[in-house]
Amino acid sequence: MNRNLVPIASLMVAGSAWAQSEPLDADALARCAQQVQQLRSEAPRLLARNAQLDEQRESIQQRQRALAAEAKGIGSEDLNAGLGYSERRRVLNDEARAFNADIERIKDEIRAINVVKQQYAANCAQRSYRRSDFERLSPQAQAAMRAGMDGIEVPYTD
């Protein structure tokens, strides 16, 4: 067997699988456009919110360190200082609990937007569609399909 035919045969099989992929129908094209629009609107919002939460986390951690240092200087006989410290600690703990709840909410939102991205990648990316179906989309949906995923940075959770 000619050694040069093996790679060519492999390419032909891969190419024929690609060619067998059906074009998106009108409904699927509309869903793909909606997914791109959702990704384009939600991803920047989530990235910005994530940055805000990073700043808030740092602020809480700084205040926790300051309170820990303060606690070392409070004597057991100084009741007023101890009560003030306890109140500041309670307020900070409440803020930390609210922050943790915000973190869980954004994690859920990030997971959801990643599902949309995965669905787009699996069902829409690199798929052809009929021009007539494309022309029936709204101008915003057409623009989204033209842009695709270019320039979209989607946040993710670890």
Image (cartoon, rainbow, N blue to C red):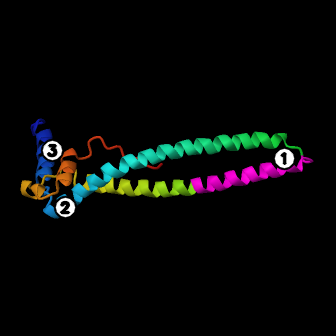
- 147 is within the stretch colored magenta: no
Considering only order in the chain, which callout, 3 or 1, is on the residue closer to the N terminus?
Answer: 3
| Callout 3 amino acid | Ser
Task: Please state if 45 lies on the left or on the right of 59 as rendered.
Answer: left
- Contact between labelled residues 3 and 1, with CB atoms less than 8 Å apart: no
Whether residue 123 is visible here, answered yes or no, is no
Whole-percent x, y for residue 14 in the image: 15, 47
Q: Which residue is mark 2?
A: 28
| Callout 2 amino acid | Ala
Q: Which residues are magenta?
A: 76-99
Q: Real-space Cα distance between discs 1 and 3?
A: 78 Å
Please name whichever residue, 51 or 118, is drawn nearer the observer in this view of the structure. 51
- 83 is within the stretch colored magenta: yes
For label 1, the SS is: helix
Whole-percent x, y for residue 136 in the image: 11, 59
Mark carried by residue 81: 1
For label 2, the SS is: helix
Please name whichever residue, 123 or 75, is drawn nearer the observer in this view of the structure. 75
Task: Please state if 49 lies on the left or on the right of 124 as rendered.
Answer: right
Whether residue 61 is visible here, answered yes or no, is yes
Whole-percent x, y for residue 153 in the image: 35, 43
Q: Main secondary structure of the magenta part?
A: helix
For label 3, the SS is: helix
Identity of the residue drawn at 78% across and 48% down: 85
Single out the mark in the foreground, 1 or 2. Answer: 1
Please name whichever residue, 104 or 120, is drawn nearer the observer in this view of the structure. 104
Dot 2, crowdedness within 10 Å: few (<14), some or many (≥20)? some
Single out the mark in the foreground, 2 or 3. Answer: 2
Q: Which residue is mark 3?
A: 10
Considering only order in the chain, which callout, 3 or 2, is on the residue closer to the N terminus?
Answer: 3
Q: Quadrant of the image for the N terminus?
A: top left
Q: Real-space Cα distance between discs 2 and 3?
A: 30 Å
